[in-house]
Amino acid sequence: MGSVKNEREMNQIEGEPKEAILYVNGVRRVLRDGLAHMTLLEYLRENIGLTGTKLGCGEGGCGACTVMVSHYDQVKKKCVHYAVNACLAPLYSVEGMHVITVEGVGNRKRGLHPIQESLARAHGSQCGFCTPGFIMSVLLDGQVGFLGLCSWKGAGLKMKAT
Protein backbone atom coordinates (compact mmCIF):
# COMPACT_ATOMS: atom_id res chain seq x y z
CA MET A 1 0.00 0.00 0.00
CA GLY A 2 2.80 2.42 -0.72
CA SER A 3 3.63 4.72 2.17
CA VAL A 4 0.52 3.86 4.21
CA LYS A 5 1.67 1.67 7.09
CA ASN A 6 -1.53 0.39 8.67
CA GLU A 7 -5.32 0.28 8.39
CA ARG A 8 -5.81 3.13 10.88
CA GLU A 9 -3.65 5.42 8.78
CA MET A 10 -5.59 4.38 5.67
CA ASN A 11 -8.91 5.22 7.35
CA GLN A 12 -7.60 8.68 8.25
CA ILE A 13 -6.71 9.29 4.61
CA GLU A 14 -10.10 8.02 3.41
CA GLY A 15 -11.87 10.44 5.77
CA GLU A 16 -10.26 13.50 4.15
CA PRO A 17 -12.24 15.48 1.60
CA LYS A 18 -11.54 14.41 -1.94
CA GLU A 19 -12.84 17.50 -3.72
CA ALA A 20 -10.37 19.74 -5.47
CA ILE A 21 -11.38 23.33 -4.79
CA LEU A 22 -10.24 26.84 -5.47
CA TYR A 23 -11.70 30.26 -4.90
CA VAL A 24 -12.21 32.66 -7.77
CA ASN A 25 -13.02 36.26 -6.88
CA GLY A 26 -14.34 35.15 -3.49
CA VAL A 27 -16.49 32.28 -4.79
CA ARG A 28 -15.70 28.68 -3.85
CA ARG A 29 -15.38 26.47 -6.93
CA VAL A 30 -15.24 22.68 -6.93
CA LEU A 31 -13.05 21.37 -9.73
CA ARG A 32 -14.77 18.42 -11.32
CA ASP A 33 -12.82 15.44 -12.63
CA GLY A 34 -11.40 15.65 -16.13
CA LEU A 35 -9.88 19.14 -15.99
CA ALA A 36 -6.23 18.14 -15.57
CA HIS A 37 -5.45 19.11 -19.16
CA MET A 38 -6.61 22.73 -18.67
CA THR A 39 -4.67 25.83 -17.86
CA LEU A 40 -6.00 28.30 -15.34
CA LEU A 41 -6.73 30.69 -18.21
CA GLU A 42 -8.84 28.13 -20.08
CA TYR A 43 -10.81 27.36 -16.91
CA LEU A 44 -11.46 31.04 -16.16
CA ARG A 45 -12.60 31.85 -19.69
CA GLU A 46 -14.33 28.64 -20.82
CA ASN A 47 -15.79 27.21 -17.61
CA ILE A 48 -16.60 30.31 -15.57
CA GLY A 49 -17.03 32.91 -18.31
CA LEU A 50 -14.51 35.41 -16.89
CA THR A 51 -13.13 36.79 -20.13
CA GLY A 52 -11.24 39.79 -18.74
CA THR A 53 -8.11 37.66 -18.45
CA LYS A 54 -6.78 37.38 -22.00
CA LEU A 55 -4.68 34.99 -24.05
CA GLY A 56 -2.01 37.06 -25.76
CA CYS A 57 1.25 35.35 -26.58
CA GLY A 58 0.53 32.05 -24.81
CA GLU A 59 4.13 32.03 -23.54
CA GLY A 60 3.87 34.23 -20.44
CA GLY A 61 5.72 37.16 -22.01
CA CYS A 62 3.00 39.73 -22.70
CA GLY A 63 1.17 39.72 -19.33
CA ALA A 64 -2.37 39.86 -20.75
CA CYS A 65 -3.19 36.72 -18.74
CA THR A 66 -1.92 38.00 -15.36
CA VAL A 67 -4.03 37.09 -12.32
CA MET A 68 -3.38 37.30 -8.61
CA VAL A 69 -3.09 34.06 -6.66
CA SER A 70 -3.27 34.21 -2.86
CA HIS A 71 -2.78 31.66 -0.15
CA TYR A 72 -2.08 31.58 3.56
CA ASP A 73 1.60 31.05 4.35
CA GLN A 74 1.73 29.17 7.66
CA VAL A 75 5.39 30.05 8.21
CA LYS A 76 4.89 33.81 7.71
CA LYS A 77 1.45 33.65 9.36
CA LYS A 78 -0.06 35.86 6.69
CA CYS A 79 -1.69 35.81 3.32
CA VAL A 80 0.74 36.09 0.42
CA HIS A 81 -0.09 37.22 -3.09
CA TYR A 82 1.61 36.32 -6.36
CA ALA A 83 1.26 37.35 -9.99
CA VAL A 84 0.65 34.27 -12.12
CA ASN A 85 0.55 33.92 -15.88
CA ALA A 86 -2.74 32.05 -16.19
CA CYS A 87 -1.89 30.87 -19.71
CA LEU A 88 1.01 28.82 -18.30
CA ALA A 89 -0.41 27.67 -14.95
CA PRO A 90 -1.92 24.20 -14.89
CA LEU A 91 -5.37 24.47 -13.32
CA TYR A 92 -4.59 22.13 -10.43
CA SER A 93 -1.46 24.11 -9.52
CA VAL A 94 -3.75 26.65 -7.79
CA GLU A 95 -5.88 24.08 -5.96
CA GLY A 96 -6.88 25.39 -2.53
CA MET A 97 -5.80 28.93 -3.39
CA HIS A 98 -7.68 32.13 -4.18
CA VAL A 99 -7.50 33.51 -7.71
CA ILE A 100 -8.39 37.15 -8.30
CA THR A 101 -9.05 38.22 -11.87
CA VAL A 102 -9.54 41.73 -13.17
CA GLU A 103 -13.31 41.22 -12.73
CA GLY A 104 -12.70 40.59 -9.03
CA VAL A 105 -10.73 43.81 -8.66
CA GLY A 106 -13.64 45.99 -9.74
CA ASN A 107 -16.25 46.56 -12.39
CA ARG A 108 -18.82 49.14 -13.45
CA LYS A 109 -21.62 47.54 -11.42
CA ARG A 110 -19.74 47.34 -8.08
CA GLY A 111 -17.36 50.17 -8.74
CA LEU A 112 -13.86 50.34 -10.13
CA HIS A 113 -10.70 49.92 -8.11
CA PRO A 114 -8.67 53.18 -7.89
CA ILE A 115 -6.06 51.70 -10.24
CA GLN A 116 -8.75 50.98 -12.84
CA GLU A 117 -10.23 54.46 -12.43
CA SER A 118 -6.85 56.11 -12.73
CA LEU A 119 -5.91 54.18 -15.86
CA ALA A 120 -9.27 54.98 -17.50
CA ARG A 121 -9.16 58.65 -16.50
CA ALA A 122 -5.65 59.05 -17.96
CA HIS A 123 -6.54 57.17 -21.18
CA GLY A 124 -3.85 54.67 -20.20
CA SER A 125 -4.49 52.04 -22.84
CA GLN A 126 -4.66 51.76 -26.58
CA CYS A 127 -6.90 48.94 -27.77
CA GLY A 128 -7.49 47.72 -24.21
CA PHE A 129 -6.60 44.07 -24.81
CA CYS A 130 -3.65 44.12 -22.39
CA THR A 131 -5.22 46.51 -19.88
CA PRO A 132 -6.46 43.77 -17.50
CA GLY A 133 -2.90 42.43 -17.26
CA PHE A 134 -1.58 45.95 -16.61
CA ILE A 135 -4.08 46.44 -13.80
CA MET A 136 -3.23 43.14 -12.15
CA SER A 137 0.51 43.82 -12.39
CA VAL A 138 0.22 47.31 -10.91
CA LEU A 139 -2.08 46.00 -8.18
CA LEU A 140 0.40 43.30 -7.22
CA ASP A 141 3.42 45.57 -7.42
CA GLY A 142 2.18 47.49 -4.40
CA GLN A 143 -0.18 44.85 -2.95
CA VAL A 144 -2.76 47.65 -3.17
CA GLY A 145 -6.20 47.09 -1.71
CA PHE A 146 -6.02 43.36 -0.95
CA LEU A 147 -4.03 43.18 2.25
CA GLY A 148 -7.12 42.14 4.22
CA LEU A 149 -8.25 39.49 1.77
CA CYS A 150 -7.40 36.31 3.67
CA SER A 151 -8.22 35.01 7.08
CA TRP A 152 -7.16 31.68 8.49
CA LYS A 153 -9.92 29.63 10.10
CA GLY A 154 -9.07 26.20 11.46
CA ALA A 155 -8.26 23.71 8.73
CA GLY A 156 -9.29 25.84 5.76
CA LEU A 157 -8.59 29.13 4.10
CA LYS A 158 -11.62 31.39 4.18
CA MET A 159 -11.74 34.26 1.72
CA LYS A 160 -13.53 37.49 2.24
CA ALA A 161 -15.47 38.59 -0.82
CA THR A 162 -14.24 41.85 -2.27
Image (cartoon, grey):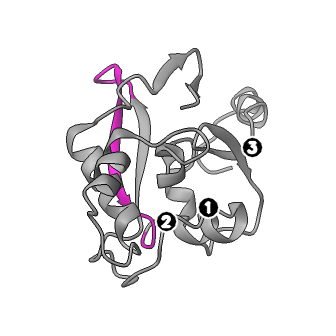
Q: Position of residue 14 (x, y in %)?
A: 78, 36
**Is residue 11 placed above or below 127 in the rendered structure?**
above
Q: Position of residue 34 (x, y in %)?
A: 75, 69
Task: Tell me where residue 43 sits by quadrant.
Answer: bottom right
- Tell whether 142 sits left or right of 28: left
Q: Position of residue 156 (x, y in %)?
A: 59, 25
Give the mark nearest the N terminus, 3 or 2.
Answer: 3
Asked whether disc 2 touches disc 1, contact meaning CB atoms under 8 Å apart, the reply is yes
For residue 53, the mark is 2
For residue 21, the mark is none
Give the mark nearest the N terminus, 3 or 1.
Answer: 3
| Residue wearing tag 3 | 18
Residue 127 visible? yes
Q: Nearer the viewer, mark 3 or mark 1?
A: 1
Q: How far apart, in angstroms, are the residues tagged by discs 2 and 1?
A: 7 Å
* SS for dot 3: loop
Task: Tell me where residue 119 sits by quadrant.
Answer: bottom left
| Highlighted range, magenta | 73-88
Q: How far apart, in angstroms, are the residues tagged by discs 3 and 2?
A: 29 Å
Residue neighbourhood size for the residue with mark 2, other residues' Cα within 10 Å, grouped as few (<14), some (14–19), many (≥20): many
